[in-house]
Amino acid sequence: MTDTVLHVGSASPYDVVVGRGLADRLPGILGSEVQRVAFLYAAELDELAEPVLDALRADYDVLALGLPSGEATKSAEVAFQCWDALGEAGFTRSDAVVTFGGGATTDLGGFVAATWLRGVRVVHVPTTLLGMVDAAVGGKTGINTGAGKNLVGSFHEPAGVLVDLDTLLTLPREELVAGMGEVVKCGFIADPVILDLVEADPAAATDPAGKILPELVERAIRVKIDVVVADLKETGGGDGHPGREVLNYGHTMAHAIERAEGYTMRHGEAVAIGCCYVAELARLEGHLDDATAARHATAFAAVGLPTTYAGAGFDELLAAMRVDKKARGNTLRFVVLNGVAEPVVLSGPSQEHLRASYDVMTGGAR
């Protein structure tokens, strides 16, 4: 396939390149002024990382730092270890970070780059579907704390993103399916064509060697680019649009579920459940029609994602949602839909509807 270049025209513009076999593009993005590169990668991806390391070592002094798997890497302890390594290696503001891995690796690596010397260049090379359509684009970085997910972080836009679709060929099936949670979400909040493609042929939509998944990846990235260019730091959109908060559709409940599960549930799986929850909440609050609310469960289930969850009680999940970043004081706020691609903010839904939506989420009937 021909490489596609998606331009992010923000205050710090950069390109997202979507294609196959993209390692040779790295020096062009990093530039000639960079001397040292910290390569922060998911340690289990040693073999997959070799072509990228070879491309970097031809032009730079490379410090390779293997990171723990999954959400375990998004901790203050791991960040401190990276900072110490950068200090010992003498990294300066003219040096750079390259991340290689899934969403958690991207979040942690971006946070390290954002905070080292108050910010150095970072290039993301996401290796999972989730990382490609979500974590690598938009400049959000962060780590988790005992109080919740992504509560410590900063905005730090990358110098570029390389979305190498060949890495999806080696991705475990369950990880690919989980990444579809964010893809289908983008369909509901902004691009109905995504939903049409997924519903028309779910098998093709999840085939990493086919032609449909690359289109879905590009469409989901375009959705995120359009949103973050208009509202990088979540200050809000115009004409009632939630702005960047729209990307957190379904995430208020999703993050609560992830916390209840000790961050062992895949993010995209939690997002699918969270979107179904908030669709039911929007229906009960008079925002969403029955058919579109029901479409959430069928669309996510079509690609193999869960749509119900009964692993934690209502009070536990409600308490977790109250520390969500969208909450204001004691008021819960949710991004909901008036229809497909018609997002709005719902503030202070009734306790009755919150609990009724939970009952549906646990498998109860409407």
Image: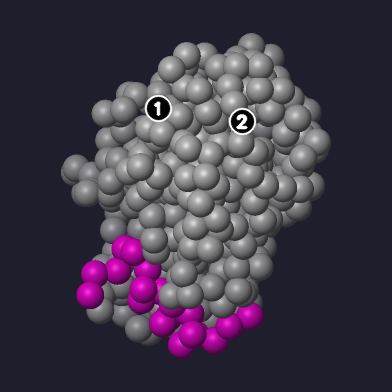
Q: Secondary structure under badge 2?
A: strand
For the rendered model, the colour scheme is one colour
Amino acid type for the residue under numbered disc 1 = Ser
In this rendering, would 328 be left or right of 53? left
**Image point (76%, 52%), residue name:** 174
| Occupied quadrant, residue 197 | top right
Q: Nearer the viewer, residue 365 or 93?
A: 93
Q: Secondary structure under badge 1?
A: loop
**Above or below, comparing residue 194 to residue 150 in the picture:** above
Q: Residues within 10 Å of mark 2 (few under 14, many from 20)?
A: many
Measure the alpha-carbon separation of dots 1 and 2.
14 Å
**Image point (55%, 47%), residue name:** 85
Q: Is residue 1 magenta?
A: no
Residue 61 rendering spot, x and y as whole percentages:
59, 26
Q: Nearer the viewer, residue 54 or 151?
A: 54
The reply to whether the C-beta atoms of the residues labelled 1 and 2 are less than 8 Å apart is no
**Above or below, comparing residue 222 to residue 175 in the picture:** above
| Occupied quadrant, residue 151 | bottom left
Q: Nearer the viewer, residue 321 or 101?
A: 101
The numbered disc on residue 62 is 2
Amino acid type for the residue under numbered disc 2 = Val
Residue 14 rendering spot, x and y as whole percentages:
40, 24
Q: Is residue 321 magenta?
A: yes
Q: Nearer the viewer, residue 301 or 138?
A: 138
In this rendering, would 233 be left or right of 149? left
Which stretch appears magenta?
311-329
Which quadrant of the figure contains the N terminus?
top right
The numbered disc on residue 196 is none
**Image point (48%, 50%), residue name:** 83
What residue is pinned by disc 1? 94
